[in-house]
Structure formats: C-alpha cells, structure tokens
C-alpha cells in the first residue's frame, strides 16, 4: 500500500489542456524545464475558514484558490493575522474548513474521515513548525524516522541517509535535540518532514525562532532539499526576505490571495506580478534547476 504510486492527477490536462484554475501562467507555462509535464500536487478550491459568529465572526480564510505543482517551492506571505497559519492548517488537514476543498495529490482530503485523514497526513504531508516540535527523549535519527515508524513502515535507509547527509546532520544522529543549536534542530525537523517522501512539505514560519544568519542557512537548505529531492514545499512566512528563496510568492491579506509572483530568474526583471482580478497577466516560466 505504501509503495503504491501517488495517484496521478490528470484533471489539469482535460479540456484541451485548459488550465482553468491557474491564476497565473497558461498550460504551456506549466511545462517544467525538466522536460516533463508539471503535475498539480496541491490545490485549494474556494477554501474558507470562519471563526466565531455574529459580531465576532472572523473570516480567517475567505475563498482561497491556489495551485502548486509537484516539485515547486511556494511561499505564502502576509502580515500577522492575514490567515497564513489557518491556511497551512487547512492544507495539512490539521483542521477542517468552513467551506471549500483541499486536494493533495488528487485526494479531496476533507472527504476523508478523521482516521483516514490522520493516516493520509502521516504518509503524504510533512510538517516543519517554527518551534521544531522534536521529541526530547528521542535522538535525532529516531525523531527523523518517527513518522515512518508510526505508519508501521520500514524507513527507506538510503533516502534517509542522503537527507541526513544533505542537511549536514551526519555526525549528530545520536544527539538529543536539546544538545543541538536551533538551526540544527530545525534541520532535523526538515529531515523528519522529508523522511516519508511526502507529497508536500508544509512549513509554518520555519525560521521564526532563528537569528538572521541561521535563518538564511536553513532556508537555503530547505530550497536545496526541494530541488534535490524534487520535493514540493509550501512555506508560510511574514518575512519578505525569507520568501525570496521560493519559486513563487503568494500574498494573502484578510484571508484572501491578493497577488502571486513568480520568483525572477537571475538577471530577469522582477515584474511578473499577477494581481487577483487581472489574471490575464502571464508570469514567465519560473526558474528551474
Ligand atoms: N482558533 C481561532 N479562534 C478564533 N480566531 C482565530 C483562531 N485562529 C486564528 N484566528 C483569527 O484568524 C485570523 C487569521 O489568523 P492566523 O491564520 O493565525 O494568521 P497569521 O498566521 O497570518 O498570523 C486572525 O484574525 C486570528 O485572530
Ligand atoms: Mg501564523
């Protein structure tokens, strides 16, 4: 079961390649430079989450439609209270929306019951949180393989070894989390998120507890991991500089997407902004390794 290939999601290829859901880009723009069709791996449809009622009603998310390709590294930016964490919780199936859908690798995750969703989350979604969330009594290696083991599966030793190596944790596998620096702890958390080869890694302010220098190092590692393992990453951050590491930046305000901007290629003008309401603007193909 674990080794079953992720359900291919061909919906975007229907209607003569009409990519009706794309806010930026046309279908041909979504032909990755890796020479294969880019596949949509994460998608929201009219996603809404309201808290409270009456005069206290908060529209934390208010009709969010986003689409993320396999292998893409997307940043969601916005000021405090704009709805970033709420969006991440919905994308990861940690909380159920008031309305709308989230599809991960073609699966409508909220059509699942709680138990099925928990299993799906463990297999298909990796999380990186601001506060690392490592288990203090487990060493680095045990933390990294924990989600795989919870799933009753044998860790893919070769994959995990290359993740550990790439994150510079090879000499730290036996260490307990509290003996590590913040940057090392977050690198261990990134390794844990990648261990099960999830469909998508969701990161909530992953550098929020780190100093500027370490933040830069961790974000570059996250980007490198995304490229090396073709790992889809959706990261939320209030930090504009951190967001620049992403392939694409989605901006939210008051629970709504207000713009999407493809990261400029080196030397290209940084003008590829698509404002919602003017979806005819086409962003250039995003830079690919
Ligand atoms: N559990 C909750 N109950 C009530 N209001 C909430 C809850 N979680 C978030 N909110 C409200 O929803 C809005 C968006 O919050 P959040 O998603 O945490 O924003 P961000 O992560 O961008 O700072 C804010 O107004 C916040 O106060
Ligand atoms: Mg938040």
Image: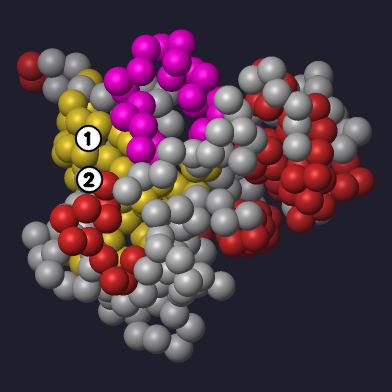
Q: Please name the residue shown 35% across and 18% down the image.
A: 112
- Which residue is the extreme one toward the bottom? 267
Q: Position of residue 74 (x, y in %)?
A: 42, 55
Q: Which range is magenta?
A: 104-132
The N terminus lies in which quarter of the figure?
top right
Q: Position of residue 206 (x, y in %)?
A: 56, 45
Q: Is residue 123 magenta?
A: yes
Q: Left or right: where does residue 132 sit relative to residue 171?
A: left
The C terminus lies in which quarter of the figure?
bottom right
The image quadrant that residue 212 belongs to is bottom right
Look at the numbered disc 2 and give the secondary structure of its residue.
loop
Residue receiving disc 1: 47
Q: Is residue 2 magenta?
A: no
Q: Is residue 189 visible?
A: no
Task: Check whether the beta carbons of the residues at disc 2 and disc 1 lie within 8 A of each other.
Answer: yes
Circle 1 Cα neighbour tier, 10 Å, few/some/many (<14 / 14–19 / ≥20): many
Q: Left or right: where does residue 15 sit relative to residue 153?
A: left
Q: Please name the residue shown 36% across and 38% down the image.
A: 106
Q: Looking at the image, is 247 positioned above or below residue 135?
A: below
Q: Which mark is residue 216?
A: none
Q: Position of residue 219 (x, y in %)?
A: 60, 57
Total marks drawn?
2
Q: Please name the residue shown 56% across and 33% down the image.
A: 4
Of residue 223 and residue 150, the one placed in the foreground of this image is: 150
Q: Position of residue 154 (x, y in %)?
A: 76, 27
Q: Is residue 61 visible?
A: yes
Q: Looking at the image, is 246 positioned above or below residue 177?
A: below
């Amino acid at each position: 079961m674990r080794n079953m290939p992720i359900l291919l999601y061909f919906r975007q290829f229907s209607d003569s390649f009409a990519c009706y859901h794309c806010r930026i880009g046309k279908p041909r723009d979504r032909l990755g430079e890796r020479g294969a069709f880019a596949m949509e791996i994460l998608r929201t449809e009219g996603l809404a989450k309201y808290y409270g009622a009456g005069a206290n009603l908060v529209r934390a998310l208010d009709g969010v439609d986003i689409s993320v390709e396999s292998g893409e590294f997307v940043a969601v930016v916005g000021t405090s209270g704009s709805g970033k964490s709420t969006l991440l919780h919905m994308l990861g199936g940690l909380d159920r929306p008031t309305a709308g859908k989230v599809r991960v690798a073609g699966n409508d995750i909220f059509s699942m019951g709680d138990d099925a969703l928990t299993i799906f989350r463990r297999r298909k979604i990796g999380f990186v949180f601001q506060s690392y969330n490592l288990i203090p009594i487990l060493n680095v290696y045990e933390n990294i393989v924990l989600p795989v083991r919870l799933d009753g599966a044998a860790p893919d030793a070769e994959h995990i070894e290359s993740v550990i190596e790439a994150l510079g944790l090879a000499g730290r596998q036996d260490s307990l989390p509290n003996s590590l620096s913040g940057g090392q702890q977050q690198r261990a958390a990134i390794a844990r998120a990648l261990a099960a080869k999830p469909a998508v890694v969701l990161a909530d302010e992953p550098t929020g507890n780190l100093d500027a220098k370490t933040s830069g190092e961790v974000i570059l590692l996250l980007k490198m991991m995304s490229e090396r393992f073709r790992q889809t990453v959706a990261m939320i951050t209030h930090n504009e500089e951190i967001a620049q590491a992403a392939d694409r930046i989605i901006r939210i305000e008051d629970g709504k997407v207000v713009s999407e901007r493809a990261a400029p290629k080196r030397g290209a003008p940084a003008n590829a902004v698509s404002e919602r309401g003017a979806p005819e603007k086409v962003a250039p193909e995003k830079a690919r390794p």
